[in-house]
Image: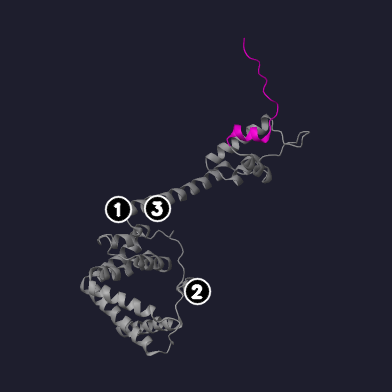
Amino acid sequence: MHPSFTPPQQVKIGDAAAFAGTTPRAIRHYHEIGLLPEPERGTDGRRRYGYDDMIRLLWIRRMAEAGISLDDMRAAFHENRDIEESLGRLEETLAVKEAGIKRQRAVVERLRAVGSPLGLLSELVTNRLSHLPPGALRRSDLDALLVTERVFGPLGAAIQASSFIVLATYPGLRAEEDRLDAAEAGLDDGVDPLDPRVEEVAAQRYAHHKAVEKVIEADGLDVDEEKLFETYDADLTGEEPALMSVSEAITKMPYGFSPARLRCVELTGKLMAQDHAVDS
């Protein structure tokens, strides 16, 4: 004997969700946006879903799995838009996702190869610094490159990397960098911006910058920088993310510098600007 079985004519929302492989919350959302007509409620005030409701729900789930947007689903059901139009948009969306996945895989590969947060920076920057021995770069170096990449893009950070290559290679220059960092940190809120020490530290920072630039030229790193400009321009696709302007970055990146330290930075910048004006 075969067991008698009579399928229900209607089911509750929980059963409908379980059969379709979704959730009651998702089904309610489909009702809200007009994708799935809301069925009449039973005497107990609960929705009851029949065969036609379930068929539509199953198609909705299949389209969702294919990546079709809810708006395109609604248009498809109402037959007021060519399916080719929806598929074209879907292909564009998938292409963007594929490009994103490709970028993520490239970052994972760099992280594995480099074995440090350096791999999270752009390939242009990582390639310039990956030859350095482990521990040669400070975390503060990577922090600076991260900020530069946000403001000036990969090329700007790759150019800045020359300075960190020099600091990692010449212990004397690294020691002077550390001394100047400490001196600048000492220009706290207790120091008057017009204190002579401010100008002294600015002049020393400028001299240190010139010393680093001299080594960059002597070691041929400036030639590498010129090559970066050529390869970077050639690799541009026009889809690069928009960069933040320097003026905008200044108002949004907090450093908490004291007035004295800010004046020191400004004086150093003026000395460097005067130097570049003479060269040009």
Q: Earlier in the sequence, mark 2 or mark 1?
A: 1
Residue 266 falls in image quadrant: bottom left
Residue 54 falls in image quadrant: top right
Q: Which residue is mark 1?
A: 113
Q: Position of residue 230 (x, y in %)?
A: 31, 65
Report the residue at 68% width, 20% height from top.
6
Tag 3–tag 1 contact (CB < 8 Å):
no
Above or below, 10 relative to 236 = above
Q: Spatial distance from mark 2 to mark 1, Cα to Cα?
A: 36 Å
Report the residue at 50% width, 48% height from top.
93
Q: Nearer the viewer, residue 113 or 52?
A: 113
Q: Secondary structure at mark 2?
A: helix
Q: Position of residue 262 (x, y in %)?
A: 43, 81
Q: Which residue is mark 3?
A: 103
Q: Position of residue 196 (x, y in %)?
A: 37, 90
Apparent side of residue 99 relative to residue 49 in the rendered image (left or right): left
Q: Spatial distance from mark 2 to mark 3, Cα to Cα?
A: 30 Å
Look at label 3 and name its amino acid.
Arg
Q: Nearer the viewer, residue 272 or 131?
A: 131
